[in-house]
Image (spheres, rainbow, N blue to C red):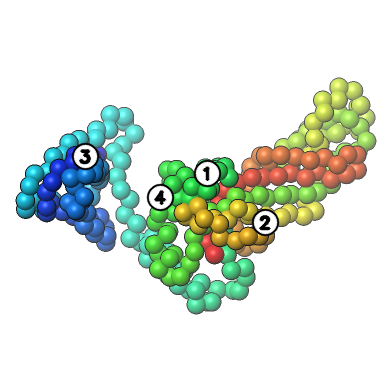
Amino acid sequence: MFATVIILLPSAYTGGQVIVSHSSTTKTIDFSPNSLLSTALLAWYTDVKHEVKPVTSGYRFALSYNLIQVSPSGIPCLPDMTDSTTQLRRVLTKWREDRYIQGQNMMTYLLNHQYSSANLKAGIKALKGADLHRVTFLRPIAEELGFVVGLASLEHNVTGPAEDCGGSSFYGRGRWGHRRYDYYDDEDDDGETPGMMEVDSTSTNISGLVDLEGGSLVSLGKIEVEDNCLIPKEPFEDQSPDDEEYEGYMGNVIIHFLAWSVDKT
C-alpha cells in the first residue's frame, strides 16, 4: 500500500474536517458546506500524516480505497521539498533585490514534455507529470515574492555555412550529425541536407506567453531570450534538430529546435 483514496458521496453533515501534513506544510480540508450537493475526492500518500475530525451532525457517506503497488520498481512517496523551498526562496529574493549581475529581467526553464499552442491556452491544467509538479511547487513562492510564472513556446535556431564542396554525395558525419559531401563523387545523390561546418549565429525566442490560467501576458509576437537566462545551460547541445533549411551550394544550413518552457518574468 502506498496511498489512500477517499470518495465522499453527496450527504448532509457538519464537521469531519481532514487535516493533512507533510514536511513543513499543513492543510485543513473541509467539504461539509457543500456536502449535500457535491461529490469530492481526497487522496494522500502513506507518508503524509493525516487526521480526521469527528462528524458533529448528520451522516457522511464515503468510499475508501487503498492503492497497492504491485510492480518491483519501489513504493511511490511524496518528496520532501523543504530544502528546495528554502533555496528557491533565497534565489528569488536575491534576484528581486538586484543582487545578481544585471541582465534580462526574465528566466526561461525548459519543461520535459512538448505542448501545443492549444495546450498552452489551458494553462497549468495542460501540464503532465514532473512538469506539473515543478510548476505547482514554484507558483506560490514566486507569486509571494512578486514574480509572474507563465507558459510559452520556445524556438532555438542555429545558422552556419554548409559543408558542401560542390559534389552531391556525402561522406562521414559532421558536428550536427549530418552526412558530409564527397567532393569527388557526384553519384547516388540522396537529397540529404549537408552538415554545418561551424556556427555563425544562434537565436532563442519565446512566443505565445500566457499565465497559468491560459490568459495572454504580452501582445508581442516573440521575445528574445538571452543565453544566460536559459535553464538548463546549453539544453540543445546534444539534441537533434526538429527542422532544417539548406540555402543551396555555398549557402547556409539553418537548423531549428522547438521546445516548450516555463518563463519566470
Gap in angstroms between the C-alphas marked 1 and 4? 17 Å
Q: Quadrant of residue 233?
A: bottom right
Q: In the displayed structure, would residue 180 be above or below residue 104? A: above
Q: Quadrant of the C terminus?
A: bottom right
Tag of residue 221: 2
Gap in angstroms between the C-alphas marked 3 and 2? 45 Å
Locate residue 166, reporting x and y percent: 93, 36
Depth check, mark 3 against mark 4: the one in front is: 3
* Residue type at the position of mark 1: Asn
Looking at the image, is mark 2 or mark 1 earlier in the sequence? 1
Local packing at callout 2 (Cα closer than 10 Å; few below 14, some 14-19, many 20+) is few
Instruction: Name the residue located 81 percent from the left edge and 49 percent from the top edge.
Output: 160
Local packing at callout 1 (Cα closer than 10 Å; few below 14, some 14-19, many 20+) is some
- Residue 231 visible somewhere in the drawing: no
Q: Quadrant of residue 240?
A: top right
Q: Quadrant of the N terminus?
A: top left
* Circle 1 residue: 119
Q: Quadrant of residue 73?
A: top left
In-front residue for pair 247/175 = 247
Secondary structure, mark 1, is: helix
Instruction: Name the residue located 57 percent from the left edge and 48 percent from the top edge.
Output: 260
Gap in angstroms between the C-alphas marked 3 and 4? 23 Å
* Circle 4 residue: 133
Are discs 1 and 3 less than 8 Å apart at CB? no
* Circle 3 residue: 7
Looking at the image, is mark 3 or mark 2 earlier in the sequence? 3
